[in-house]
Amino acid sequence: GDLSMIIPDMARGYDLIGDQYSHAPIWHQLVPFAAGSLVSTARDIVDYRRAVFRSDAISDAVRHTLLSTTTLSGGQENRYSLGGLVLSTFHGHDKVSHAGDIWGYASNHAYYPAEDLTIVMLANRQMSNPALSSVEAKVARIVLGIPQPDIRRLKLSESELTRYTGEYEVYPFLIGFERLGFSAAEGGQLLMHFGGLEA
């Protein structure tokens, strides 16, 4: 993880400012620690995820703890498990996932336990566009045989466009991005921007 070293085939992180790419800042691995200091490959993440959920080296008790959740003060289940994983379903398929980004890099992985399927997305740009969670969902649809959604082009009225245009914080779960932006486009269309209007 020493970003000052030259390592063959290691991805270099970039930032996109306007329409110009630049090298992302170099940071010391101890600064983010568990919040961004993992250096790996897609293949190793697949092997790791399979080992956690399928290997005899991990006990069922540990797996149970990894997938345990708590309840928020408002009574809503916190789908962010004690193991630091997001528990959800995707068109009837149980899904265990996590996204992340840090200076110059973004990632997303999803594990579908019933199918023993792991999908890993890695990008060498923070908050890549399109969002890696969106790309993962498209790949999952193909692999799991889930039909693509019916996409219809609906025209919104001026009042509807005005009502929804703006910035929104993603709450209470901040996974992959913290903000969504919506802007009006020609022809009565509403555009969604992962990461906000400036992303």
Image (tube, rainbow, N blue to C red):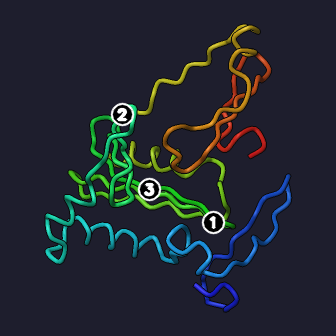
Mark 2: give few (<14), some (14-19) or many (20+) Cα within 10 Å: few
User: x and y percent of residue 154 in the render?
Assistant: 62, 14
Q: Dividing the picture into quarters, in which one does residue 54 lie?
A: bottom left
Front-most of residues 170 and 57: 170
The CA distance from mark 3 to mark 1 is: 14 Å
Q: Which residue is drawn at 66% across and 84% down?
A: 3
User: Which disc is residue 76 wearing?
Assistant: 2
> Measured along the vertical axis of the image, is residue 42 above or below residue 110?
below
Mark 1: give few (<14), some (14-19) or many (20+) Cα within 10 Å: many
Q: Is mark 1 on a helix, strand or loop?
A: strand
Q: Which residue lies furthest to the front in this view?
A: 73
Three-letter amino acid code at the position of disc 1? Tyr
The residue singled out by tag 3 in the image is 98
Three-letter amino acid code at the position of disc 3? His
Three-letter amino acid code at the position of disc 2? Gln
The residue singled out by tag 1 in the image is 105
Q: Residue at x 24, y 54 (%)?
A: 113
Q: What element carries label 3?
A: strand
Q: Which circle's residue, 1 or 2, is located before the other in the chain?
A: 2
Mark 3: give few (<14), some (14-19) or many (20+) Cα within 10 Å: some
Q: What element carries label 2?
A: loop
User: x and y percent of residue 145 in the render?
Assistant: 32, 41
